[in-house]
Amino acid sequence: MNSVKDINKSWLSTDEAAKYLGKTRNAIWQLVSKGLLIKRKWGRRLYFKKLELDQLIENSLI
């Protein structure tokens, strides 16, 4: 179950981004390869800005 902390996160991992968008990890990578989504790397992990995911939804790009 999601907590309030999870809902208010600004940055999501690849798995969290996929779940948030209702897509697969592969679909996330396709968005990145098409230049529709920017990935950021911290250490050995990749993160996506939740605001940018919301913009994809609002602009119907997914």
Image (spheres, rainbow, N blue to C red):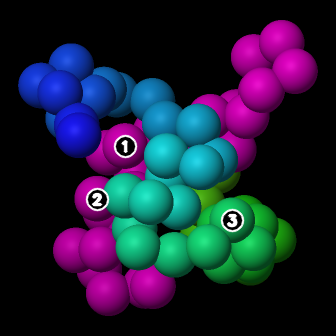
Horizontally, residue 32 falls left or right of residue 13, namely: right
- Disc 2 to disc 1: CB gap under 8 Å: yes
- Asked if residue 22 lies left or right of residue 25, the reply is left
Q: Residue 1 location in percent, x, y?
A: 23, 40
Contact between marks 3 and 2 (CB within 8 A): the answer is no
Q: Of circles 1 and 3, which is in front? A: 3
**Mark 1 crowdedness (10 Å alpha carbons): few <14, some 14-19, many ≥20:** some
- Check residue 41 for magenta coloring: yes
Circle number at residue 50: 1
| Quadrant of the snapshot with the C terminus | bottom left
In the picture as drawn, the residue positioned furthest to the top comes out as 43
Task: Count neighbours of disc 2 (C-alpha within 10 A) and say few if under 14, some if 14 to 19, many if 20 or more.
Answer: few
Q: CA distance from mark 3 to mark 2?
A: 17 Å
Q: For the point 49% across and 52% down, which residue is it? A: 17
Visible in this render: residue 34?
yes
The residue sitting at the left extreme is 4
Which residue is at the front of the view, 11 or 33?
A: 11
Residue 6's place in the image compared with 20, above or below, is: above
